Amino acid sequence: MIEYEKKGYLVQDFKVFRLKDTALSPIPFHYHEFHKIILFLSGKANYIIEGKNYPLVPRDILFISAGEIHRPVPDPKVPYERIVIYTAPGFLQRYARGSENLAACFHFAREHSSVMHLAPGKSHDLLYHMKKLEATTRQQDFANELYTEILFVEFMILLNRSLLDHELEEFHTAAYDKKILPLLKYINEHLFDELTVDKLAGEFYMSKFHMMRKFKAETGYSLHQYITNKRLLQARSMLTGGIPLTKLCFDCGFRDYSTFSRAFKELFHQTPKDYRQQNR
């Protein structure tokens, strides 16, 4: 049984929109197949990303990579306002030039902090550019689609420059479970190794039943489904290469191709072979 869900679909290379919600219903843990950037404008909210709970303050920028489990926890009594950007990983890759990659900010966030703070008065006025980008997406002027894409690429360049120039402050006050966060890190670092419940319980000196209950409570997912879907997301990213499907299946931690193909189709609604042919 699937314990969590994929939310949202992206049918274009990127999407930018502003949201302001009051009395927002609780949002369950979920993930996306695309990257997400959020500029928190106002309200009172926490954001849980891969087991870390971040209290937000205005001008925080959140980086959520494709496949990362997350959920916002806004105070329903306070309006929750933010600008949201969705972008397809493949679109950012098209603009890669050698070691320069527009997706570098997501790699940086995974290594350091998923939430950065944009202090006022910096040389790269990201708030201005993000608001301009959001406003432009709603216009109907000549060549607006092309202009919006140019603004988006410019914004991503400035965002990555801000990180390289240390103009975004890392957020260090995230709360997390001292048992579950190391477990999440271990799983992601050993994703293609054998990861049985017994092995993980022994590695972290926990009762396997206690470990499974804690994992579900902190992430919203069962341990098995989390590992399976992380492997499938990695496998899908490798399908655009020339690795034989059977080898890719075993490389990604699956023991037989039929199980892999069935799970892949259940999650992505097409077989690995069909996905490869479509995205070649």
Image: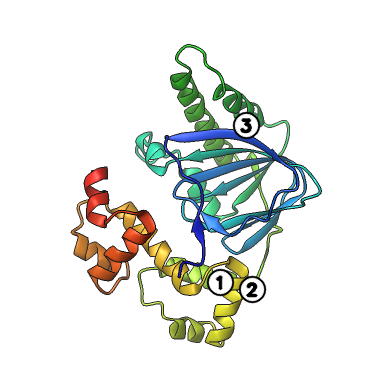
Q: Left or right? Give the position of 129 relative to 173.
A: left
Point out residue 196 in the picture as x, y percentages from the top left corner.
41, 80
- The disc, 3 or 1, on the residue closer to the chain's N-terminal end is 3
Q: Which residue occupies the foreground of this view, 231 or 225?
A: 225
What secondary structure is found at the residue carrying circle 1? helix
Q: Amino acid at mark 1?
A: Pro
- The disc, 2 or 3, on the residue closer to the chain's N-terminal end is 3
Estimate the spatial distance between the alpha carbons at disc 3 and disc 1, rounded to whole Å.
33 Å
Q: Amino acid at mark 2?
A: Lys
* 271 w.r.t. 155: above or below: below
Q: Left or right? Give the position of 96 relative to 108.
A: left
Residue 182's label in the rendered image is 1
Residue at 36% over, 61% down: 266
Whether the residues at callouts 3 and 1 have beta carbons within 8 Å, the answer is no
Point out residue 30 in the picture as x, y percentages from the top left corner.
54, 57
Q: Which residue is mark 3?
A: 126
Crowding at mark 2 (Cα within 10 Å: few <14, some 14-19, many 20+)? few
Q: Which residue occupies the foreground of this view, 147 or 74?
A: 74
Residue with the most extreme right position: 77
Q: Which residue is mark 2?
A: 178
